[in-house]
Image (cartoon, rainbow, N blue to C red):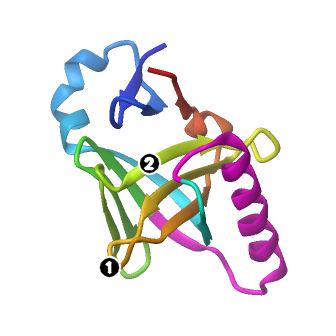
Amino acid sequence: MTFVLLNKDFYIAELPENWTDTKETLMEGMVFSVKYLGMTLVEQPKGEEMASAAIRRIVSTARASAKKFQNVTLKVSPKGITLTDTETNELTENVSIYRISYCTTDKAQDKVFAYVAQSQYNETLECHAFLCPKKKTVSINSFKT
């Protein structure tokens, strides 16, 4: 299996066999249609237990809310992650790869992808979670270096 490398620690999305034919696409970014579940503050930049607890909080809050989930386009590139509201086409988030400290899926929530990044406004750490339409879309893993 081949994955798109976010940085030396994280990768996302299983690539097709002919991925070398699409190198330009990879450099420009891979695009995914997902639903934004929400964000919570975390105290650690990485860790499976921290992320799992944060995802549980986000999913619990999202389920309790009567609001419809925001449909967003999540674009992953070597520069980072951008989020665009699907309905308004408005850029809602532009996260530099240097601000991202952790990416994960949760064992209990196999269609949920989350990342931890430092806020662009202050030094707080935020965990953002997304619901993917298919488990295969969430072929996200972190590996040890």
Position of residue 141 relative to residue 92, above or below, is above
Kind of residue indicated by mark 2 = Ser
136 magenta-colored: no
Residue 37 visible at all: no
Which residue is pictured at 53% across the width and 69% down the height?
Answer: 71
Quadrant of residue 3 within the rendered picture: top left
Q: For the stretch drawn in magenta, what is the main secondary structure?
A: helix
- What is the count of numbered marks? 2
Position of residue 107 relative to residue 101, above or below, is above
Label 2 packing within 10 angstroms: few (<14), some (14-19), many (20+): many
Residue highlighted by disc 2? 101
Q: Which residues are magenta?
A: 45-72
Quadrant of residue 106 within the rendered picture: top right
Residue highlighted by disc 1? 90
Q: For the view shown, which residue lies furthest in the left direction? A: 24
Question: Which comes sooner in the sequence, label 2 or label 1?
Answer: 1
66 magenta-colored: yes
**Element type where label 2 sits in the image:** strand
Front position in the image: 45 or 59: 45
Residue 92 visible at all: yes
Label 1 packing within 10 angstroms: few (<14), some (14-19), many (20+): few
Tell me the CA gap for discs 2 and 1. Answer: 25 Å
